[in-house]
Amino acid sequence: MLVTLMRSYVRTGLQDHKGSTCLQEKERCERLGGYFDEDGYLNGQLSVTRAIGDWHMKKEKLVIAEPDVRQMVLTDNDEFTGSKLCFH
């Protein structure tokens, strides 16, 4: 799920990409026996480590469905929040 907040006409992403560029996620997967190829794909197959599907990679707990949750106080300058699901 991608979430974006418009604050004072500036678009702010509220999520972090969970994959080879996120050190904590990379270390978690490597501890479980996973690897990232030179293109950043987990076990050469997937570019993210958090997803709803991809059951074949959930057995080893390399891909998890645990969300990244943040709380923030909305202000009068917050004009738009949007979200969408992305399926590949």
Image (cartoon, helix red, strand yellow):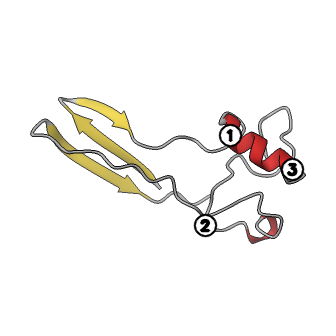
Residue drawn at x 9%, y 39% as measured from the top left: 76
Q: Nearer the viewer, mark 2 or mark 3?
A: 3
The residue beneath circle 1 is: 24
The x and y percentages for residue 7 are: 22, 34
The residue beneath circle 2 is: 52
Number of residues whose C-alpha sits closer than 10 Å to that of mark 2, classed few (under 14), some (14–19) or many (20 or more): few
Label 2: which secondary element: loop
Point out which mark residue 68 bears. Answer: none
The x and y percentages for residue 14 are: 40, 42
Q: In which quarter of the view is residue 72 placed?
A: top left
Residue drawn at x 86%, y 38% as measured from the top left: 37
Residue 82 relative to residue 69: left or right: left
Q: Amino acid at mark 3?
A: Gly
Label 3: which secondary element: loop
Residue 28 relative to residue 11: left or right: right
Q: Earlier in the sequence, mark 2 or mark 3?
A: 3
19 lies above or below 60:
above
Point out which mark residue 34 bears. Answer: 3
Q: Quadrant of the C terminus?
A: bottom right
Q: Nearer the viewer, mark 1 or mark 3?
A: 1
